[in-house]
Amino acid sequence: MLIGISPALSPDLLHVLARMGHGDEIVLADAFYPGETCASRSLRADGVRIPALLDGILRLMNPDSFVSDPIVMMSPVPGDSADPAIEREYRAVIEKLWPDTPAIQKIDRFAFYERAKKSFAVVVTGETVKYGCIILKKGVIPVK
């Protein structure tokens, strides 16, 4: 355990976050996501829900402020729906830590998969909600 670091963040995840550069993306995927198949670097966070990971990660890195879509989720496929409470839950975490972050962008399922394949890493979580996967683009550390 480290002081100030969320216990939801494993040593492997901390290592990945430290290795990421500006503009690199990390996917926080649900428990059903084929991380091993669809990513060159896949980590596990079994039993950990995405809001807890989002809170821990966004305390250590900021979303990219140079793009219009630093945070992306998958839109439901035609004929299906997502629970809007999930996006509100994620947004509450984002607002608490980085309130100037643009709205979460939605992209279709296959565009999400293609973007995820190009990501720095995919973290397969314990999340079980439909359409709960989210992509974060790492920003430049703000200079104070």
Image (cartoon, rainbow, N blue to C red):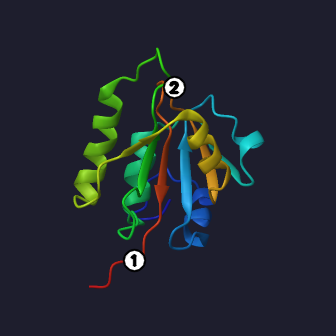
Q: List x then y, in percent, for residue 94.
A: 30, 52
Direction from residue 12 to residue 127 in the image, left or right: left
Which kind of residue does numbered mark 2 sit on?
Thr
The residue depicted at 64 percent of the width and 55 percent of the height is 121
Q: List x then y, in percent, for residue 4.
A: 38, 64
Q: Disc 1 and disc 2: Cα gap in Å?
A: 32 Å
Q: Residues within 10 Å of mark 2 (few under 14, many from 20)?
A: some
Can residue 45 be seen? no
Front-lying residue, 91 or 116: 116
Above/below status of 15 relative to 144: above
**Quadrant of the rendered image containing residue 32:** top right
The residue depicted at 22 percent of the width and 58 percent of the height is 99
Q: List x then y, in percent, for residue 62.
A: 38, 66
Q: Which residue does the numbered mark 2 point to in the structure image?
A: 128
The residue depicted at 37 percent of the width and 51 percent of the height is 55
Tell me the SS state at disc 2.
loop
Front-lying residue, 10 or 54: 54
The mark that comes first in sequence, 1 or 2, is: 2
Which kind of residue does numbered mark 1 sit on?
Ile
